[in-house]
Structures are given as C-alpha cells and as structure tokens.
Amino acid sequence: MHMKTILILLVLALATIFALVCVLLTRGRAPSTCQHRPPGQEDTDAGQSLVFADLTPEELLQVVRYLRGHLGVPLVDASRAKPSDNCIASVALQVPAKAEVLRFLDAGGARPPREALAVLHFGNQPDPNVTEYVVGPLPTPAYHRDVTVQKYGGKVPYHRRPALAVEYEQLGEFLKSQVFPAAPSFMHQVMEYDGTSLAALTAAPRGSRSGDRLTWFVLFQNVSGFFAHPVGLEVLVDHSSLDISRWVVSRVFYNGQYYRDMVQLESAYVQGRVSVEKVRKAPQDGDFSSMKPRAPPAAPFPLQYEPQGPRYSIRNNHVVFQAWSFAFGMSVNTGLRLFDVRHKGERIAYEISVQEALSVYGSNCPGGMSTRYMDGSFGIGRYASPLVRGVDCPYSATYLDVHYLAHAEVSRTRRSALCIFEQNLGSPLRRHYSNLQSLYYGGLVNSALVLRSIATVGNYDYVWDFIFYQNGAVEGRVQATGYTSSSFLHGDGLRYGNRVWEHTLGTIHTHSVNYKVDLDMGGVKNSLVAQDMVFEMTRAPWSLEQQIERPQLTKKVLDTEDQAAFRLQEKMPRYIYFAANSKNKWGHQRGYRIQISSFAGEHVPEASSMERAVSWARYQLAVTRRKEEEPTSTSIYNQNDPWTPTVAFADFIDNETITNEDLVAWITAGFLHIPHSEDIPNTVTVGNSVGFLLRPYNYYDLDPSIYSHDGVFFTSEQDFTACEINPIACLPKTASCLPNLPPFTYDGFKNI
C-alpha cells in the first residue's frame, strides 16, 4: 500500500473519531421535547359550572324525540320543511333563572333542573305562528310549557320567523326555475347565465311594513369571493305566501333602472331599450377577489409555545387561569357568552355575553340601500366557523368543538369552533426602571388568557374575544374581517362608497355590536357612579397673585336608568363604574370600571319606522335594573319585522331607580366602514377592532398582579444572571425545549 494512501486513510480515521467525540459531547445539550406539567392552580368547580353548559348531542336528540311524541301535531324535519309545515327550528339551553343559580352556587341550594328552549315554526295551523317551549328535565324530558306569551306578551306572528336554510334553498330554486327563464335573451346574452354562474345574496329586512316577506336578492358572478363581483341585476321576491307556487317577483332592478318583472326586462332588452353594462366574466378563482397568496411561502412566521404546557385548565365548560375562573357557552343565536366570572375567588360578573351585531348599509342599488343586517337572526353561534390552527388562533391553542341544533332535527358538531390560549402580548403589563436614588428594575410580562370564536355570517367574519389579564381586567373585543359587501357601480354610486374595481362599489356601512354585562361585586346589589374632571381656578396659597389651574375630581351617583343611558354621540363621563356595598382598605367603594373602545358611525334616525327594533344602538352605554323578563336587548324576530319589534330595548329604560340594585350594563361599540381599494380582496382586522374593558377600580387594596408568579425584580447590587434572583435568566435552561406541535388537521369542509 502506498504511503500516500495510508496517510489519507489515517486523516479520514482521525476526522471520524473527532466527529464522534463532538456528537458525544453535545448529545446531552440537545433540546428535549417540552414536558407538560399540571397548572399551578386547582379547579375546585366540582361540576357546578355545568348549570351553564350547552346541551350535548344526546340531550338535543332527547328533546327532539320528546317533542315529536308529545305535541300532537305533525312535524317535518326543518331541513326539508315547506313554509306550510310545522317544524323544530332550533333547540338550545334554557339558562335557569339567576336567583335559582345563585342559591345553588352560593347557598348550597338544589341544582336547577336542566331544561331546553325549543323554537317551533307552526305553518300547518289555522293561525300560523312561532312558539317557544321550555322542555325538561334533561336528560329525560317529562314536561313542556309554552313560554311565548310570557316572554313576548303575545304570540309571535309567523311572518317574523327567521328564514330557515331550506327557505333559502327554495328561493334559489325559484330564481333558477321560474325567474331567470322569463328573460332568456337577457340572461344568456348579458348575464352569460348557464344555470350555475350566478350567486344570490339576500338583503334584510324583508319588505317595508309589518306582515311583509319580500326580499331583494342581489346577483353576483358565482366565483371565489363572489361578494366583490356584482353584475347589476337584483330581484325582489314576494315569498309571503306559505304556498311556494304562489311566490312572485315584485320588482326587478338592472343597472339603475327598475322593471315590473323579468318579462318586462326581457321585452325592453329585445327592443334595445336597456342600457347594458356587460361585466367581464371572471375566472373561477375570482381573479382580484381570490384570497390565494400572491407570493410563495418564505421563512415561517414566529410561533409561541408553552415550555411546560398550558398554564390554564379546562374541565367541561369551566376554565381556570391563575386568579381567574369562569364558565363559557355558545348561544346558537348570539354566540359566545361567559357566566360566573371570578377573580381571586370572588364573582365579579354573573354574565358577559354578545347580544347582537348590526350592519346598516347605504347604496344607490335597492338591495344595498335597504339592508340592515341583524346577525343574531341568522345565528352568530350557528355560523361559528372551524378555526385554522396557527392562523385563527395560535398553533398550540386548545381547540374545542361546539354542538348545536338549528334548521334541522339532527344536531351538528362544529369542529374546533372555540379556542383557548394564553398569549404573551409582547409588552409589559407594568414596569419601571429606576435610575434615581436606588437602582432597580421591576416588571411583569403582559400574558393574558384568550377565549375566541370566529363567526362567518355571510360575507363578514367576526373574531370574538374575551381576554383575561393578570391585573383583574377582562376585555370583550370584536374584530371584523372577511369580504366587504358591494353594489354594482352606476350613476351617483360614489355618494355611497368608493370604487374598488371596474364595476364594484364598496358600499358605506356601519357596524354596531351590543354586549350584556351583568356585574356583581360583593353580591348582586350595586350602584353606578360617574367620575370625571374639571379645571379649578385658584390662587397659589404661597403666592396669592399667582393663579393655578388644577384638575379637580367630580363625582356623581347615577340614581336612575334615565341618568345612566348615554346616547351614542353624547359626552359620557370618562370614569363610570359599578360600586359595591363594601370598601377597600383606603375607604373607597370597591368597584369595576367600564371603559368602551368605539368609533361608531351615526345611528339610524329615531324617526325611522324600524329604529325601535335596534334601539339598543342608540346608546353607547345604558345601565338598567336586571330583570328575568329582559334577558336580551333584542330578538331574533326583529330582523323580519322591525316595524313591530318583538323586543324593543328602549322600553327597558323607564327611569327606575338603580341605586343598590342588581344592575346590567348594555354596551354598544362599533365603527363606520367606508370600503376602499385596500379592502380588496379582504378587509383586515387592523383598525377594525372595538369593544370594552372591565377594570378594577379601588376593588383591591393594590394591583393584584403584584402577586403574579411572572414578576421580575432585581437591583444593581444583585446578581441578575442568577435564576433565584431573576427567573428570566433561567429561560435558556427552563425553556430550551422543542414544542411538541400536533399535526395540522382541518375539518371545516365536512358536513357543511
């Protein structure tokens, strides 16, 4: 063997030995998989929160079986019911009366019976109506009682019923089989309609007076993101008859002109009397409206992870996070809601819930100008969408399913419709760096717990959050995204929005969201106090010729509901808080302050014939006595008959005294949206976020977050690199682990 070959082999052997030594030396320092540890706090709920839990699929099934066997009338599955049929429209939890629940939670009383609220459409009766039944006890129902008159003061007329999914299917078939064929030349030559190339979007409310059921349908190209592709054709359908064969077209609109029906439009078109504005046919992906990224993937975006697993616990519908605990649920109509919210073991709120989301549109097209969407009628909870891991919520969040029964007799499961996660908000909750006198640093990372759902109601996606902070504050927040609604651009359209594509007018509209906040501090009896400031002019005591303008505190107890109802654009005291009948160490009434974040547009004029149906939106804040007969600020029946509203919030405010009473705050937050080119293809959440904060105000003797285990403090004289002094210094050891990310899955396209 040549010497050169021997030397080469020797070098290779040495290199191999060196590499093995390096591997052995570094093996012990390789990051391991993060190990989950139980949360530090213990859940002592013992099942009490189940009194607020949504109905299970088995319970929903039992209610349907009971109703089928005990009502004595024929019932058709709502998924295939005609307007002239009887059907079960929805079944959901009947939340027990507050007094019963508090006796159970606080005084060792009996657990309230578990009951369901069933909404039935009775179309196959001499007097068609909507009836609500309470059914119980679950899981084995034995009784039902009609609560319609008790809740609403009378029967609910049938025309007020929310449209079922099957009614939209029937209307779609009516357009396809009866309406469009009446104008064959126009539909083929102008619309290039092939039987599937158009999509329809409903306007609401339906008509112009009580008893109407007339709906404008706005037509779009049936492509991805169709909301941005109006074609200029809109059809008004009268579907008030319970006999589908008697549905008729009441009016047709095309490119600024109105026609009696499609026959008249066809005749005018054939005679050359129609001003045609032909829209370029869009590809199936929608072209400009496509949400497909225009750039290839690059480096992954930052991820958060939990080095020792989640620091919160979830048992059934009960969550514990540090000093917080609460029960949660999902109303099929109004969406996310909280019950029995406690901080440091004390209840601060009995209920915090979404009530309604209202959008009021402007346009010079009939569908747009007549639209006032009340999303609770469509079902904010029903349209809670499956969440995408890593985008809709952090990748490592906890994802929960939601079960509901609506528009069919079989319950449905919405996979991953809720997420819960702790989020490092990337900024300090509080901090101070001292370079005067003593030298030290003290701070606390702003890490908060988030409960989230996202409802896709038609074109809009609403991100609903409840956020729990370590200082005892809780936030309710909604962010709007999705597609902006649009009209066909013609005539003076730019008075009602901005042009965002060739034929697309992004139409001006307002968003208003209403919340119910039932605060209970130190018991159910609270008062409402307002504080603000004025400048006081005074002479300096040490120099009488010198004038000083100093801020001075003003304070007023708001005694009545009228005093506590603040109109939307009215100046409101900057500090408003619920005050308990107890004091903190410093002699102040313990309280929680309501702080609203909103830049709402104008409210519908009160002279409007439909304003009372949305009269909650008159007020940025209204505080009323809590009453079991006033559980919600609106009704699902208001959408289709706003002219005679089933629930008118304005009637809640009748100047009753609110001193030392069980009080509810009704909070409205909103924003004006004038769509612009950057809303194409999608509206972003940035800048479109509103809500409220509930903040402790003299409730504690000092900031409760000082007791957080996340606090950091060190002085110039300490070794701030030592773990026992500064826990942040330990992170290279305690947090140097590989997150155990679950595989990506998504069930959002199943069972739609």
Image: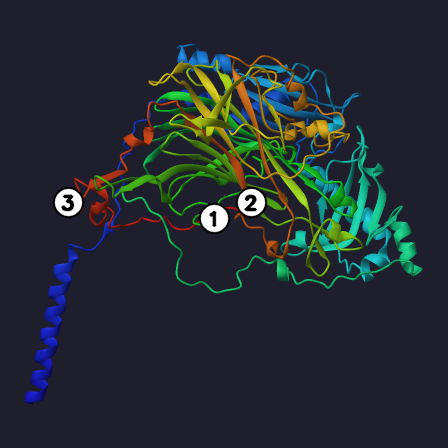
Q: Is residue 176 visible?
A: yes
Residue 36 appears in which quarter of the rendering? Answer: top left
Q: Secondary structure at mark 2?
A: loop
Give the residue at mark 3: 719
Give the residue at mark 1.
746
Q: Give the Cα separation between the discs numbered 3 and 1.
A: 48 Å
Ranked by sequence position, the earlier of labels 1 and 2 is 2
Question: Which residue bears the numbered disc 2?
Answer: 688
Rendered image: mark on residue 539: none
For the residue pair 518 and 396, the one nearer the viewer reads as 518
Chain-order first, disc 2 or disc 3? 2
Tell me what residue is drawn at x 39 percent, y 10 percent: 108
Nearer to us: label 2 or label 3:
3
Q: Position of residue 241 (x, y in %)?
A: 82, 33
Q: Quadrant of the C terminus?
A: top right
Counting from the top left corner in percent of width and height, residue 607 is at: 77, 30
* 301 lies above or below 602: below
